[in-house]
């Protein structure tokens, strides 16, 4: 245990292109890139599906089907089929990040109180206005919940991506394993990398929870939680449960 | 990159594939079972005492957040296991299962209507008997929903263990990748997905069979 922390806090490992700051930055870059692209695809799609009620099967099918797909398999297959580098990895991260955001947005828009939507129509709002001014703000907690789940999924999978020779914090785990568990740069390096990944994931989770508190209107926050709890009790579905990563 | 598709690899290696598959099932399913057995009493405690809930639910959230490769790597540090011990994969999977189910079980138990437990008590059920025959069965739909997520995720997460030298179908994935063998890689992925979906369907079915009253209720609701 001490050797892992010694490795982690060794100043030598905190500088240069293979040090922790550089690896953390790489990791965050992959994560940010993948989540942004995924959100740009999944939020509009989920909003339209939730608003119109068309294509619902796509949401449930995607989130259940992709849960079974092994991340390691998807990554290695895409790299084998295309080329080594950032692009195939980002593509597979985006593929994994889409279902939780899609499910969150869809469920959020779908579960907006019908009387609020009716009132908006009564005030003369048209469909798209209802969506952007009423449904999406009300759906925000579940949308952010979806983005949070997607971010954690991507942080975890980006760690695995070191195996297909990408940077990021997974490098320490993979390099340590390749060095052999007994060597000084072996298991201590692996454990140090693992600790860094775990801390990064927990920090991001906390950060996104904070974002949710700041962005979501207080009136919406409590209401949605209560309704989601009721929904889970009445008709438990698997599509809104986050995956372990 | 040119990828090899050596079709004869498949029939020539059925023994190896079967061995990897059974290893994978052992690695993935045992922890889910253990996790289920542990999370029922924990969920009960969390549904009963606010203090237990205040500790268990946030702890579950934290553990659930830790990425699999990190947790797998950290098990030897915490338990002193060897680096290729199957426990390094099984302990994280059990932890994820417990983290997922403790909250579901406790929510489901808390949702059991007070008049139901009161009626059971009134006709003479002792608390433990009442828990086993009234409250727990009513929580089954929620538990099954959580269990389905746990088992399907476990099937796919087990593959990550191959990165630190633990077997199962993940070994065929890394092997196929290193040898540029597309058939081996795709065979492993397909087996993982198909087996996971079969188990998922079986659980869904078992949950329905175990709770006939949920269908009766729905029928009654439709006619009312």
Image (cartoon, coloured by chain):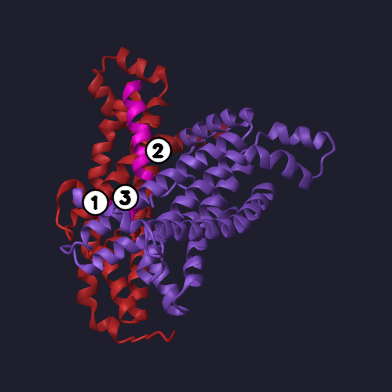
Per the image, the residue denoted by label 1 is: A6
* Left or right: residue A194 compared with residue A219: left
User: Chain A's shade in the image?
Assistant: purple
Q: What number of labels is visible?
A: 3
Task: Identify the subunit bearing mark 3.
Answer: A
Residue depicted at 26% across the width and 54% down the height:
A7
Where on the picture, by quarter, is residue B20? bottom left
Residue B18 in percent (x, y) is at 22, 71
What residue range appears in magenta?
B50-74
Q: Give me the C-alpha separation between circle 1 and circle 3.
A: 12 Å
Residue B181 in percent (x, y) is at 34, 81
In magenta segment, residue A103: no
Question: Would you place residue A44 above or below residue B207 in this image?
Answer: below
Question: Would you place residue A186 above or below residue B124 in this image?
Answer: below
**The C terminus of chain B lies in quadrant:** top right
Of residues B187 and A179, which is closer to you in this image? A179
Q: Earlier in the sequence, mark 1 or mark 3?
A: 1
Residue depicted at 37% across the width and 85% down the height:
B5
Task: Identify the subunit bearing mark 1.
Answer: A
Dot 2 crowding, Cα within 10 Å, few <14, some 14–19, many 20+: many
Residue furthest to the right in view is A124
Q: Are the two marked residues, 1 and 3, in contact with CB atoms closer than 8 angstroms?
A: no
Which chain is displayed in red in the rendered image?
B
SS for tag 2?
Answer: helix
Q: Give me the C-alpha separation between circle 1 and circle 2.
A: 44 Å
SS for tag 1?
Answer: helix
Secondary structure mostly seen in magenta is helix
Q: Give me the C-alpha separation between circle 3 and circle 2.
A: 33 Å
Per the image, the residue denoted by label 3 is: A195
């Amino acid at each position: 245990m001490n050797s892992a922390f010694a490795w982690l806090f060794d100043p030598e490992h905190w500088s240069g292109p293979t040090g922790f700051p550089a690896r953390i930055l790489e990791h965050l870059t992959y994560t940010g890139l993948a989540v942004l692209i995924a959100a740009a695809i999944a939020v509009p799609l989920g909003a339209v599906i939730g608003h119109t009620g068309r294509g619902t099967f796509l949401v449930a099918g995607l989130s259940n089907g992709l849960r079974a797909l092994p991340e390691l398999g998807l990554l290695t297959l895409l790299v084998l089929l295309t080329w080594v580098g950032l692009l195939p990895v980002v593509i597979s991260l985006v593929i994994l990040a889409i279902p939780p955001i899609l499910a969150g947005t869809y469920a959020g828009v779908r579960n907006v109180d019908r009387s609020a939507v009716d009132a908006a129509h009564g005030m003369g709002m048209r469909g798209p206005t209802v969506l952007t001014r009423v449904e999406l703000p009300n759906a925000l907690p579940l949308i952010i919940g979806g983005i949070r789940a997607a971010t954690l999924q991507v942080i975890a999978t980006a760690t695995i991506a070191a195996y297909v020779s990408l940077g990021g914090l997974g490098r320490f785990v993979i390099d340590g394993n390749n060095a052999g568990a007994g060597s000084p740069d072996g298991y201590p390096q692996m454990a140090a990398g693992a600790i860094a990944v775990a801390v990064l994931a927990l920090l991001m989770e906390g950060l996104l929870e904070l974002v949710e508190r700041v962005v979501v209107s207080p009136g919406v926050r409590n209401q949605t939680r209560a309704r989601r709890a009721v929904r889970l009790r009445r008709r438990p579905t698997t599509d809104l449960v986050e995956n372990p990563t | 990159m040119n990828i090899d598709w050596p079709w004869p690899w498949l029939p020539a290696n059925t023994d190896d594939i079967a061995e990897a598959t059974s290893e994978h099932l052992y690695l993935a399913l045992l922890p889910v079972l253990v996790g289920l057995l542990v999370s029922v009493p924990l969920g009960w405690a969390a549904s009963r005492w606010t203090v237990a809930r205040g500790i268990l639910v946030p702890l579950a959230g934290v553990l659930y957040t830790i990425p699999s490769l990190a947790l797998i790597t950290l098990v030897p540090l915490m338990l002193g296991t060897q680096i290729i011990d199957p426990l390094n994969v099984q302990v994280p999977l059990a932890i994820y299962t417990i983290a997922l189910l403790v909250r579901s079980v406790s929510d489901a138990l808390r949702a059991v209507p007070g008049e139901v437990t009161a009626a059971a008590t009134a006709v003479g059920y002792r608390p433990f008997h009442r828990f086993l025959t009234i409250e727990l069965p009513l929580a089954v739909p929620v538990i099954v929903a959580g269990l389905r997520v746990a088992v399907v995720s476990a099937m796919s997460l087990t593959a990550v263990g191959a990165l630190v030298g633990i077997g199962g179908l993940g070994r065929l994935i890394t092997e196929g990748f290193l040898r540029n063998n597309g058939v081996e890689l795709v065979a492993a992925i397909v087996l993982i997905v198909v087996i996971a979906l079969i188990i998922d369907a079986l659980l869904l079915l078992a949950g329905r069979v175990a709770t006939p009253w949920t269908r009766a209720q729905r029928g009654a609701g439709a006619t009312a």
